[in-house]
Image (cartoon, grey):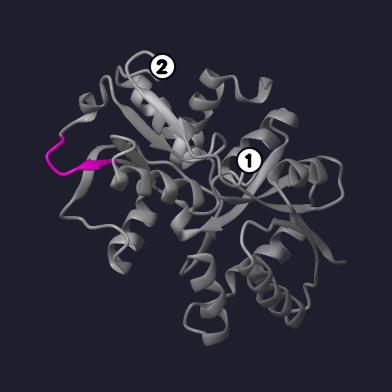
């Protein structure tokens, strides 16, 4: 039986990634029936309606599934790089501490970005700095519906910091590292004034009724992918991982608090 799986096309490379994964699964006798979606709301709807068996979900989409199923769902697997992420608040060198934001403007990603908007704003609120009261947040609404699975909003927020249009910006640790390596971000000019608690990112989500037998078959194939194999490495480099790991749900508490405080799903 084909496993029906969904993925959101947040970037053209997504189709390349899933072509490689699909061929690997087929070669192992575990064929996939792939559906692409324009945004995570459509993908979550498809999972709830039983049009797909497995959804490659953002953390916000995972919380939506958890909410809509009253917890009758599971997180099967995730990338090694989905675990223990942080977001930084960057400012010009010389600024110090989150209190620097008092009376200033913070550039964030799109409204639905966990790492570049929801999580950092909640972390700042928990540390005594509230949007609209202590500082102004300027959201860079790029790729709405994609839950920040792209650099668009974060990069524009950083460019605004460079131009002096905002006083600080939010960036995921992985993006900061990549931008320092490729020269986009000059670490001698811009540095973190605050760093959030750790959180987890994407996972493969299924409903509770997805059979354990099919789950085990899916995971056997997924975990057989190896970074040591050149064909797998191409996909893993594109998708930003070196190893698939079992799913866990302990890393979503900070986002869950952010969503609850923002009344996100009531919108």
**Mark 2, other Cα within 10 Å: few <14 / some 14–19 / many ≥20:** few
Give the quadrant of residue 176.
bottom left
Compared to 72, does 259 lie above or below? above
Q: Is residue 49 visible?
A: yes
Question: Residue 62's mark?
Answer: 1
x and y percentages locating residue 199 in the rendered image: 43, 41
x and y percentages locating residue 192 in the rendered image: 23, 43
x and y percentages locating residue 114 in the rendered image: 50, 38
Kindly state the secondary structure of the residue where label 1 is placed.
Answer: helix
**38 to the left or right of 260:** right
Compared to 234, does 199 lie above or below? above
What residue is drawn where x is 28% and y is 34%? 167
Question: Residue 100's mark?
Answer: none
Q: Nearer the viewer, residue 144 or 2?
A: 144
Compared to 264, does 6 lie above or below? below
Reading the image, the residue beneath label 2 is 132
Locate the N terminus by quadrant. bottom right
What residue is drawn where x is 86% and y is 46%? 50
Alpha carbons under labels 2 and 1: distance apart: 28 Å
Kindly state the secondary structure of the residue where label 2 is placed.
Answer: loop
Q: Nearer the viewer, mark 2 or mark 1?
A: 2
Which stretch did the figure color magenta? 90-95
What residue is drawn where x is 20% and y is 43%? 92
Locate the C terminus by quadrant. top right
């Amino acid at each position: 039986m084909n496993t029906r799986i969904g993925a959101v096309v947040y970037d053209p490379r997504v189709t390349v990634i899933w072509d490689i994964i699909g061929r690997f699964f087929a070669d192992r006798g575990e064929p996939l029936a792939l559906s692409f979606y324009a945004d995570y709301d459509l993908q979550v709807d498809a999972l709830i309606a039983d049009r797909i068996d497995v959804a490659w979900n953002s953390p916000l989409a995972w919380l939506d599934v958890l909410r809509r199923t009253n917890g009758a769902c599971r997180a099967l697997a995730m990338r090694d790089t989905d675990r223990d992420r942080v977001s930084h608040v960057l400012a010009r060198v010389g600024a110090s501490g989150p209190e620097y934001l008092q009376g200033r403007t913070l550039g964030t990603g799109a409204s639905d970005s966990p790492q570049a908007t929801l999580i950092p704003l909640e972390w700042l609120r928990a540390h005594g700095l509230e949007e609209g009261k202590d500082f102004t947040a300027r959201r860079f609404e790029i790729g709405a519906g994609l839950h920040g699975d792209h650099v668009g909003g974060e990069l524009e927020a950083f460019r605004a910091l460079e131009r002096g249009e905002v006083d600080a910006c939010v960036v995921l640790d992985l993006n900061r590292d990549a931008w320092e390596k490729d020269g986009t971000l000059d670490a001698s000019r811009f540095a973190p004034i605050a760093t959030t608690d750790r959180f987890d990112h994407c996972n493969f989500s299924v409903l509770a009724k997805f059979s354990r037998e099919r789950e085990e078959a899916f995971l056997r194939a997924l975990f057989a992918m190896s970074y040591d194999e050149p064909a797998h490495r191409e996909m893993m480099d594109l998708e930003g991982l070196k190893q698939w790991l079992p799913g866990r749900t302990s890393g979503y508490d900070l986002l869950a608090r952010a969503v609850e405080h923002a009344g996100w799903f009531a919108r």
